[in-house]
Amino acid sequence: MNITYHVRILTNQISLLSNLLLCYSRTSVQRAAVKRNESITASNFSVAMTTMEVQKTHTTDGTGTTLSYYYDYIDAQFYFELALVFIGVIGTAGNALVLYALVASKQHKKQALIVNQNVLDLFASFFIVVVFILKLCNIHLSGVLGYWLCIIIFSDYFVWVGTNASIFNLAIITVDRYLKVVHPVWSRKYLRLPVICCAMLSAWLSSILYNTAMVLNTSGVRNGHCIGFFLYDAK
C-alpha cells in the first residue's frame, strides 16, 4: 500500500495543477478570446491586407492595436491547451492506477470516500483530454448543434463538474476524518455505508446542479467560438 499511497499523492498534485491551469483558462484565456472576437467583429479586418507583413501590422481599431498580439495569443493558446492535454493524460493514468490498486488490494469497500475521490479526479482528467483535444481541432461552431456542443463540451462543463464535485468530496472526507478522530463512538454508530453513499451522491448532484445553472446562463457561441462560464447579462 506504500506504492498506492505515493501514487495517490502524485495524482492529487497533478489534479491540483490541472485545476489551477483551468482557473487560469477560465479567466485570462476566455477574456482574451472575447476581446479578440469583439475586435474582429468591429473591424472585419478591413479586407485590405495584401501581404503578411501588412497583415501583421494592420490595426484592428483606432487605438493602434496590432494583429501581432492576435498571433501571439494563438500560439500561447495552442501550447497551453497542449499542456492541459498532457496533464490530463497523466491524471487519467495515475487515477486509474490508484483505483486498480484499491480494488486489487480489496480496500475499495473500506475507503469508499477515497475511491469516490479518485473516480471524480479520473472523470475530470479524462474530460480534460477529450475537451482540449477537440479545442485543438479549432472547430467552427454554428446553429443549434454548435450551441449545444458549446454548452456540453467546449465550455468545459464536464471538467468543472468533476472538479467541483472533487472539492465537495474533499470537504466530506475532512468532516469524516474529524468525526472519526474526535467522536469515534458516535462515528462508528452513525457513519455507516448508507450515510457515506448519500454524502458521495450529494457531491455529484450539487456539482451537476451548480454547473448546469452556471453554464446555461454564462456560456454561448460568439463568431464560431465557444465562450464558456464567462458571459453575463449587463443589467
Image: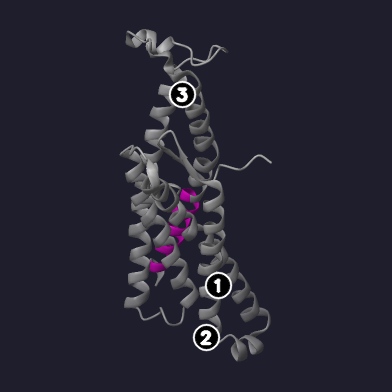
In screen coordinates, is 91 left or right of 30? left
Q: Which mark is residue 194?
A: 2
Tell me residue 147's x, y (percent): 42, 46
- Amino acid at circle 3: Ile
Residue at mark 3 to residue at mark 2: CA–CA distance: 55 Å
Give the mark nearest the N terminus, 2 or 1.
2
Q: Which mark is residue 40?
A: 3
Q: Residue at x 36, y 56 (%)?
A: 126
Which label sits in the foreground, 2 or 1? 1
Q: Which mark is residue 130?
A: none
Tell me, yes or no, whether the highlighted magenta stretch contains residue 16: yes
How packed mark 3 is, by other alpha carbons closer than 10 Å (few <14, some 14-19, many 20 or more), is some
- Amino acid at circle 1: Ser
Q: Secondary structure at mark 2?
A: helix
Circles 3 and 2, Cβ within 8 Å, touching? The answer is: no
- Amino acid at circle 2: Pro
